[in-house]
Amino acid sequence: MKIAVAGTGYVGLVTGVCLAEHGHSVCCVDIDEKKIETMRQGISPIYEEGLSELMVKNRERMTFTTDHEEAYQDAEVIFIGVGTPEKRDGSANLAYVYEAAKQIAHTVKRDCVVVVKSTVPIGTNDRLEKLIRREQKAQVKIAVASNPEFLAQGTAVRDTMHASRIVIGAEEAFARNVMLRVYEKFDAPKLVTDRKSAEMVKYASNDFLALKISYINEIANLCELVGANIEDVTAGMGFDSRIGNKFLKAGIGYGGSCFPKDTKALHWLANSYDYEMKTVKAAIEVNENQKLKMVRKARKYYEDFAGITVAVLGLTFKPGTDDLREAPSLVNLPIFLEEGAIIRAWDPIGEAGYRRLYPSEICYCETIEETLKGAELCLIFTEWREIQEIQPELFVKQMKKPIIIDGRNCYPPEVFKGGQITYESIGRETVCGEA
């Protein structure tokens, strides 16, 4: 099928590449000419495992353009995968979605299905359909369908190629049949429902996972107070098939482009109907508070951070991505900088993005060894494999004072017992180093 995709971020580009891998002819549209030229060379503008390789492999089936008219006019299916960033009040900004819909309405010249892949509030597809019918120029049939994505950054290609489910929201047979043809070669359960239910599936899924993370972080905080071990607790919980063992890893909160935005958007939507989702509101509050645990733990050792050399291992919100959106490091490091700390940081992927935010305030290091050298405190924000493989001796050898605050529970506390290292993690015992 001939498919166009509006937007080349995590959702749009991954969707387009994976559709091409399944034999469709795909044209990706973006307003950034420099970005388009990069993709024409087979280079992904985002870091995502396996994405560049698939772009090269499917080069003959993929085109990239800034000309939306060229892309949309004879496409059978047009996916909208543009961003829906959070507004100040927590609601979703749909400006890019509406702009893409108007461009589609003005340019299509054949019957087609417009598919909203972006995460949008419930009822958005209905409003888009009205907008498109009001704005369309050609006398053709344009149907609107909801097809939410369920990919995770760092595993987006795998999550799309081997999807846990494919949800299609459509109000008419034409759209349903076209969408089933699009996904004919995808081996995944397919749910065909109405558009509002499809939109809700996305929010309900993401917010449930966010709830699970915030809940286990609260249990971890209580474990620290009563002397329990969060990892033994979650292991015991995970044996229960009703609970499962996914998203039970304690840490310093969720980040990224989905959970923070989607929890706030659903909370805002409920409030617009004069209804408060107390569980979602609590998850948001717990997560914001959890991100500051690193600073609070650090203050046990230093009343203020003036002149203290701090080694920072990991900057992104999770491994496998260069995305810094809502990363806990962005909440904590400004506090250390404001108090005069000297920060040395290492991240295998996220450094470039951080340099744009802090070009000179932070010393970026090429190796972990260089980062730790002379440090009086080490903060771990991301569980990169390279960090998990560090041996305790390296901290002792390189650091002036081997105090480690591990926000991702990268190591078993027992490996530090009887040594010189002070080690704090989340929901587990603190190991006090011997002088």
Image: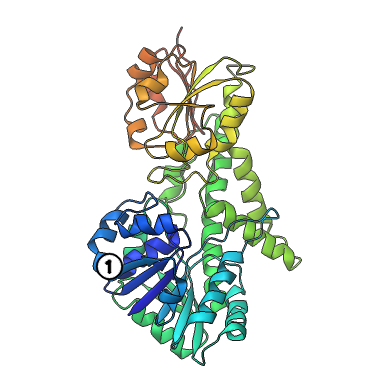
Q: Position of residue 264 (x, y in %)?
A: 63, 55
Q: Position of residue 432 (x, y in %)?
A: 48, 16
Image color mode:
rainbow
Seen from the viewer's position, the closer of residues 160 and 13 is 13
The answer to whether any part of residue 433 appears in the image is yes
Q: Residues within 10 Å of mark 1 (few under 14, many from 20)?
A: some
Q: Secondary structure at mark 1?
A: helix
Seen from the viewer's position, the closer of residues 412 and 154 is 154
Determine which residue is flagged by label 1: 21
Can you name the residue that lies furthest to the bottom here?
139
Q: How many marks?
A: 1
Residue visible at 69% across and 64% down in the picture: 270
Seen from the viewer's position, the closer of residues 193 and 120 is 120
Circle 1: residue type: Glu
Q: Is residue 177 left or right of residue 255?
A: left
Q: Is residue 71 above or below residue 344?
A: below
Can you name the residue that lies furthest to the right here?
274
